[in-house]
Image (cartoon, helix red, strand yellow):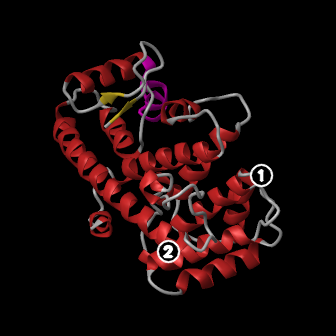
């Protein structure tokens, strides 16, 4: 059902991928025991002038996944590993092996196999960082098998769901564990259902926004509408750069969109506000 919804190319497909990337980054931060929830990660996307910290690198990793067509080129794999401070000895061999693993079996099983293989390349690396790269590889392999135009971050959004834990005091299954194939199947089922619900919600919101857009008097308004359809959130400063318009005009326009009920303010702050569907 999610595959069918994505193939319909809904107007808010970009916002869907962007929001799932945010959720995946928050889950990855949890795995790494970083103090960074979705609200904090949203703010980090707009940080300027500072070197990216671990949390910001996680958000960049998942956003990069959605930013271009799914491919297993060595440079992309090397960069993904480097974002997690993992040294990839031979990216070309890694790409070829991932490609072989992603061809075997049904799409979910193939993606689970690709994730397990990714972990096996880093036996001496920290387990959390290797697991995050494996989850990233899972989503990439799944997108390749399903021929999606852009990967959709899924499995990390539900991999920590308590219903996936085995009975007893044992740890939750990780890629490469004997229980991993079942855990991966359960996680992707939960993730696909939640993503489908989110896609339906964003579709309803986007239809209202698109209907209101012609009534906006501001000439650059259509560019801001396009940004809202493409991103999880937009700041007035970002909108002003793309429109182009002054920051004050952008703030007024967002205020009107909120008043019309077609956009939401997501930060809950009186300043440096962020807006989304």
In the displayed structure, would residue 177 be above or below residue 234?
below
Q: Is residue 238 magenta?
A: yes
Residue carrying label 2: 144
Q: Secondary structure at mark 1?
A: loop
* Mark nearer the N terminus (1 vs 2): 1
The numbered dot on residue 218 is: none
Label 1 environment density (alpha carbons within 10 Å; few <14, some 14–19, many ≥20): some
Taking depth in this image into account, of 42 and 24 the one nearest to the observer is: 24
Residue 80 is situated, as x and y percent measured from the top left of the image, at 68, 58
Q: Secondary structure at mark 2?
A: helix
**At x 52% / y 79%, what residue is drawn?**
110
**At x 58% / y 43%, what residue is drawn?**
30
Magenta stretch, residue numbers: 236-247
Taking depth in this image into account, of 84 and 236 the one nearest to the observer is: 84
**At x 38% / y 47%, what residue is drawn?**
15
Q: How many numbered tags mark residues here?
A: 2
Residue 237 is situated, as x and y percent measured from the top left of the image, at 48, 25
How far is mark 1 from mark 2, CA to CA? 25 Å
Residue carrying label 1: 85
Q: Is residue 5 magenta?
A: no
Taking depth in this image into account, of 101 and 244 the one nearest to the observer is: 101
Residue 159 is situated, as x and y percent measured from the top left of the image, at 50, 56
């Amino acid at each position: 059902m999610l595959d069918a919804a994505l193939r319909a190319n809904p107007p808010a497909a970009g916002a869907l991928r962007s929001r799932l990337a945010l959720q995946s980054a928050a889950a990855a931060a949890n795995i790494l025991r970083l103090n960074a929830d979705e609200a904090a990660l949203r703010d980090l996307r707009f940080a300027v002038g500072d070197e990216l910290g671990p949390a910001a690198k996680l958000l960049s990793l998942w956003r990069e996944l959605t930013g271009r067509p799914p491919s297993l080129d060595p440079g992309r794999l090397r960069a993904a590993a480097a974002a997690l401070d993992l040294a990839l000895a031979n990216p070309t061999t890694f790409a070829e092996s991932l490609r072989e693993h992603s061809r075997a079996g049904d799409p979910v099983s193939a993606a689970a196999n690709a994730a397990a293989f990714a972990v096996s390349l880093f036996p001496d690396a920290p387990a959390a960082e290797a697991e995050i790269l494996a989850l990233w590889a899972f989503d990439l392999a799944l997108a390749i098998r399903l021929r999606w135009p852009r990967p959709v971050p899924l499995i990390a959004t539900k991999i920590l769901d308590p219903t996936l834990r085995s009975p007893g005091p044992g740890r939750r299954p990780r890629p490469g564990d004997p229980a991993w194939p079942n855990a991966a199947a359960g996680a992707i089922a939960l993730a696909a259902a939640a993503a489908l619900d989110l896609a339906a919600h964003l579709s309803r919101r986007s239809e209202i926004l698109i209907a209101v857009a012609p009534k906006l008097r501001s000439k650059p308004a259509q560019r801001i509408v396009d940004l809202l359809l493409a991103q999880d959130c937009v700041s007035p400063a970002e909108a002003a750069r793309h429109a182009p318009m002054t920051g004050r005009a952008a703030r007024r326009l967002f205020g009107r969109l909120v008043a019309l009920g077609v956009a939401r303010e997501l930060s809950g702050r009186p300043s440096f506000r962020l807006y989304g569907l």
